[in-house]
């Protein structure tokens, strides 16, 4: 039942009670009709928003959805050292820059040194959610064969107890033949660091699809021809 139907029912109820608007009081009738529109329209909007939010919340507590949760596999471990960043106040809020001064080691799917180049850039947000930052960094890896590749990390970090923890997305870039497929894989990154010790660790996880809940194939993942 929409707003206009509600208005029509209100009019019919008024007519059945002998309260039909007379020709001598059109302004009063139009005023009441306008008030009804102004009241009922927001009511439907509020009900729609409330129902939508309720369904959204409930959906988060069910197994509804198209896909099974993806599989995560440990892919690469990062051993680093961190230093306190340099903070700068800008019109957009506080920003921070922390140089990758000491490099580190990468182990797992491949072995490489993390070169001491570049820096982490952060937009810091301090509010009722605590102290957090939007973190971006590009790590450069060098293999034993002096070949290089990069890992871009885009993460959200939380700061507490002179330490940090966060999750983010990782993206590799390389032309090394045996690692070329990394350019087109999906990765998530978990990191933590302790400013008292200067020790930081990160782990890169590879994401793999676990298919649809209904068991139907994902055509984009089938071999050419869809068979």
Image (cartoon, helix red, strand yellow):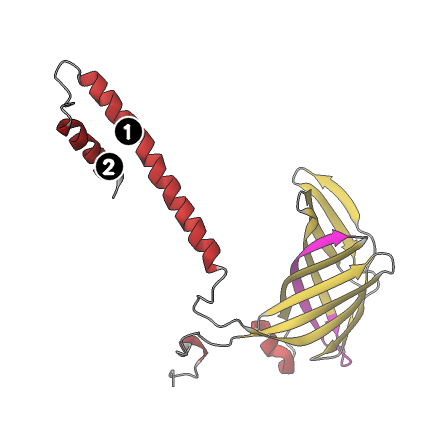
Return the residue found at the far bottom.
Answer: 227
Q: Which label belongs to residue 14? A: none
In the displayed structure, 157 sits above or below 90; it is below
Judged left or right of residue 171, residue 10 is left
How dense is the environment of label 2, judged by Cα within 10 Å: few (below 14), some, or many (20 and up)? some
Give me the residue at 28% from left, 31% from top.
37
Main SS category, magenta section: strand
Task: List x then y, in percent, for residue 141.
Answer: 74, 71
Q: Give the residue at mark 2.
A: 6
Callout 2–callout 1 Cβ contact below 8 Å? yes
Q: Which span of residues is magenta-colored?
A: 141-160
Task: List x then y, in percent, for residue 17.
Answer: 15, 26
Task: List x then y, in percent, for residue 205.
Answer: 64, 72
Give the alpha-carbon distance from disc 2 to disc 1, as whole Å.
9 Å
Give me the residue at 51% from left, 77% from top.
210
Whether the magenta-drawn stretch holds residue 144 is answered as yes
How dense is the environment of label 1, judged by Cα within 10 Å: few (below 14), some, or many (20 and up)? some
Give me the residue at 31% from left, 34% from top.
40
Task: List x then y, in percent, for residue 46.
Answer: 39, 40
Q: Nearer the viewer, residue 152 or 23?
A: 23
Judged left or right of residue 184, residue 74 is right
User: Could you tell me which secondary element the residue under label 1 belongs to?
Assistant: helix
Does label 2 or label 1 sit earlier along the sequence?
2
Quarter of the figure that contains the N terminus:
top left
Return the residue found at the far top.
Answer: 24
Picture quadrant where residue 72 is located: bottom right
In the displayed structure, 188 sits above or below 9; it is below
Q: Nearer the viewer, residue 57 or 225?
A: 57
Give me the residue at 21% from left, 17% from top.
27
Quarter of the figure that contains the C terminus:
bottom left
Q: Give the residue at mark 1.
A: 36
User: Could you tell me which secondary element the residue under label 2 belongs to?
Assistant: helix
């Amino acid at each position: 039942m929409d707003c206009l139907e509600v208005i029509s029912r209100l009019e019919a109820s008024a007519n059945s009670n002998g309260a039909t608007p007379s020709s001598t009081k059109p302004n009063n009738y139009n005023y009441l009709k306008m008030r009804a529109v102004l009241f009922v329209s927001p009511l439907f909007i509020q009900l729609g928003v409330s129902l939508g939010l309720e369904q959204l919340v409930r959906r988060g507590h069910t197994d509804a959805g198209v896909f099974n949760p993806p599989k995560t596999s440990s892919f690469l471990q990062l051993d680093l050292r961190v230093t306190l960043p340099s903070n700068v106040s800008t019109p957009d809020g506080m920003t921070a820059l922390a140089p990758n001064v000491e490099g580190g080691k990468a182990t797992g799917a491949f072995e490489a040194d993390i070169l001491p180049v570049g820096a982490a850039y952060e937009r810091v947000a301090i509010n009722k959610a605590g102290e957090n930052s939007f973190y971006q960094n590009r790590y450069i890896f060098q293999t034993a064969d002096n070949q290089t590749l990069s890992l871009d990390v885009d993460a959200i970090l939380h700061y507490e107890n002179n330490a940090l923890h966060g999750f983010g997305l990782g993206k590799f870039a390389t032309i090394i033949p045996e690692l070329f497929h990394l350019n087109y894989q999906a990765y998530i990154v978990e990191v933590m660091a302790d400013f008292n010790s200067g020790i930081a660790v990160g782990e890169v996880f590879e994401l793999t699809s676990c298919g649809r809940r209904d068991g139907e194939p994902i055509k984009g993942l089938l071999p050419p021809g869809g068979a």
